[in-house]
Amino acid sequence: MINSNLTTFNDITNEMIANAWYSVLEFHIHLSGVVGVKGL
């Protein structure tokens, strides 16, 4: 039987990605440092 209270590494990384993606969509934050660089 699988313990429902067990948190896996995959669960943690999925939550971190979801939180970062929410910030990108909601606040229009760019997570890379290449935004606005001309010539790229």
Image (cartoon, helix red, strand yellow):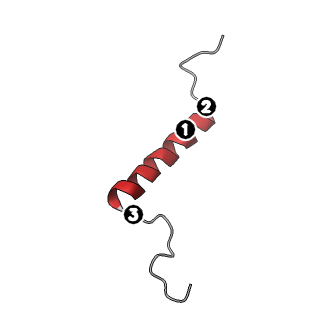
Q: Circles 3 and 1: CB distance less than 8 Å?
A: no
Disc number at residue 25?
none
The residue under the point 54% across, 89% down is 39
Q: From the top left corner, tell me how far across and down residue 8 is, in percent.
A: 61, 31
Marks 2, 3: nearer the viewer: 3
38 with respect to 22 (left or right): right
Amino acid at pointer 1:
Ile
The furthest residue to the top: 1
The residue tagged with tag 1: helix, strand or loop?
Answer: helix
Amino acid at pointer 3:
Ile
Disc number at residue 8?
2
Ranked by sequence position, the earlier of labels 3 and 1 is 1
Q: From the top left corner, tell me how far across and down residue 2 is, in percent.
A: 64, 15
The residue under the point 34% across, 55% down is 26
26 with respect to 3 (left or right): left
The residue under the point 44% across, 80% down is 36
Ranked by sequence position, the earlier of labels 2 and 3 is 2
Residue indicated by mark 1: 12
Asked which quadrant contains residue 30, the reply is: bottom left
Q: Circles 1 and 2: CB distance less than 8 Å?
A: yes
